[in-house]
Image: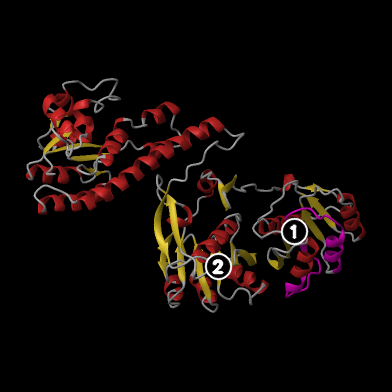
Amino acid sequence: MKVEWALLSVSDKQGLIEFAAGLRELGIRLLSTGGTGRALEEAGIEFTPVSQHTGFPEILDGRVKTLHPRIHGGILARHDDPEHRATLEKHGIPPIGLVVVNLYPFARTIRRPDVSVEEAIENIDIGGPTLIRAAAKNHATVTVVVDPADYPAVLEELRGNDGETALETRSRLARKAFRHTAVYDAAIVGYLERLAAGTDHLPETLFLDLVLERQLRYGENPHQRAALYRPATAVPTGLVGAEQLHGKQLSFNNYLDLEAAWTLIVDFAETACAIIKHSNPCGVALGATPKEAFERALECDPVSAFGSVVAFNRRVDGEAAESMAQLFVEAVIAPDYAEEALPILQTKKNLRIMRMPFDRAAEDALGELDLKRIQGGILAQDKDLYYTKVEDLKVVTRRSPSDQEIAELLFGWTVCKHVKSNAIVYTRDRRTLGIGAGQMSRVDSARFAAEKARFSLEGAAMASDAFFPFRDGIDEAAARGIRAVIQPGGSIRDHEVIQAADEHDMAMVFTGVRHFRH
C-alpha cells in the first residue's frame, strides 16, 4: 500500500530532518509530537501536530499524546478487511503507513550514577513502545522504523517504488522493532529488579538483552559455531569495547584468554605482566619496567608461553615490544602502546594487538553478574572482586612472616585467585616460580607446581586458593624449601596444618576468604 501518512516521534533526532524532508518531497503527510514537531518546525518542514489530528491535547506533562483511536486505528487497520476499511471511512481516520519512533533513553539515563528513581521512572516510554508494537504487528501494510541507520534505505525504497515498501522490508523492520521494544522492557525490568533486590539478594528474574556484535570463525573447536554478543542497551565496554590495532580476527578462545589475562593483570597496582595459556597464568611478574616484568614472567615457564596471550597493566614501550617479539604470541593486551612499540609488534602479521584503557573504579562499578550455563538453566553469582589487604591477614603460626614475606604472600595470593582450582602458586621476588592448576587434589597441585619450577624454591612463598584438607600439602612444600604460606583456612584439620607449618618453621597466614575458580 502506498504511504500517504507517516507518524514521526523520536527521542534520537539523528538524521530526522533529512528523512522528513525526503518524505515530504514524496508527498507524504507528516504527523508529529512535542520535541520531534519542534525540530521539524525549526527546519521549516510542514507537519500536522498529533493533537490537531486527534482533536485532543497532550496531557499529563506529555505522558499521554499518541494514545488515541485516530492514531492507533490508522496504524492497526487491516486493509484486506472490508469492515476495517469501512470503520476508517466512518470515523474519518486516514491510514498511517509509516511509523518512525525511537524511545526515551532509559538505559542511558540509569547508567548515570546520580540518577534518581523518579527521573528513571519518567524515562519509561509508554506511547512509543505502543506505537512500535502496533506498527510491527500490522507490518503486512505498515512500515515501522526504529533505527535512524535505516532512514536512507527506506527513503530510497519509497522513491523507487512509488511510495511503497516491499513486504520483505516491512517484515525485517518489524522483527527489528520487536527486538527494540523487548530490549527496552528488559532494561526497565532489570533496573526495577535491582532496586527491589537491593544488596542482599540477586534479582528474581534475569533478562539477557544481548545483540550480535560479530560472528566468529568457530568456537572452542572448528566444528562448533560461535559468535560474540553484547548488551543491547549499553555502549560496548570491557573486552568487547577494546580496540584491535592489528592482526587476525579474535577467536572464541582468544576472547577467553584475553579476559583471563586482563582480569588478572588489573589486580596489580605495580607494573606487571601476565602470560596466559588456556585461561591459566603460566607466568606472572612485577618489574621496574614492562620489559623487565615480561622477561621475569616468561622465565617461569617459557615452554608453555609459546602461543600464549600476554597482558600488561602499563603502556608497552619499544623495549618491551622488542623482547616480546622474540616469542610466538597469539595476542597482547595493554592500556596503550608507545609510538615505537607498534611497528615492532606489527611485524608479526597475525599477532592480535588489543588496546584497552583501564579504570579500576569503572571496572568495579560495572557490577554485572558472573553467569555460567548448565543444562536447563544458568548459574549466577557476584563477580569475585574481593581484594585482600595486609590488615586482613591472620598469622596462625609461631613464626610471623617478615614484611618482605607478607608482600610476597599477597603477590602470590593475587595470582592464585586467577588460577583454576585446585590452585597452588610458588613465588619469590614478586614473580611466579611454579603454578599448579586444575589438579584434583591439592597435594598434587603442590607437587605439580614444584615440578614445573625451573628455579630453586628455597625460601619461596606458597599461595593456595582454598584450605589444605590435610598436612601433606604443607609437608610437600616444606620439602621443596617453602618458607611462608598464605591460604584461607577453614579446614577441620587446620590445627594439623598449622602444626606442620610450625614443625617446619614456616610462617602461615589465613585470609578467611576462598578464591575457587572452576
Q: Can see residue 337?
A: no
Q: Which residue is mark 1?
A: 463
In the rendered structure, which segment of residues is drawn in magenta?
450-479
Residue 457, percent from left and from top = 78, 69
Distance between mark 1 and mark 2 Cα atoms: 22 Å
The residue drawn where x is 51% and y is 66% is 254
The residue drawn where x is 21% and y is 50% is 167
Q: Earlier in the sequence, mark 1 or mark 2?
A: 2
Quadrant containing the C terminus is bottom right
Quarter of the image for residue 476 reads: bottom right
Residue 218, percent from left and from top = 46, 67
Q: Residue furthest front?
A: 82
Q: Amino acid at mark 2?
A: Val
225 w.r.t. 36: above or below: below
Question: Is 493 displayed left or right of 405 in the figure?
Answer: right
Callout 2 crowding tier (Cα within 10 Å): few <14, some 14–19, many ≥20: many
Question: Is 107 displayed left or right of 127 in the figure?
Answer: right
Quarter of the image for residue 450 reads: bottom right
Q: SS for tag 2?
A: strand
Does the stretch in magenta take in 512?
no
Q: SS for tag 1?
A: strand
Q: Amino acid at mark 1?
A: Ala
> Looking at the rendered structure, which numbered label has been put on residue 236?
none
301 or 255: which is nearer to us? 255
Q: Which residue is mark 2?
A: 310
346 or 172: which is nearer to us? 172
378 or 121: which is nearer to us? 378
Q: Can see residue 351?
A: yes
67 w.r.t. 289: above or below: above
Callout 1 crowding tier (Cα within 10 Å): few <14, some 14–19, many ≥20: many
Does the stretch in magenta take in 463?
yes
The residue drawn where x is 16% and y is 45% is 19
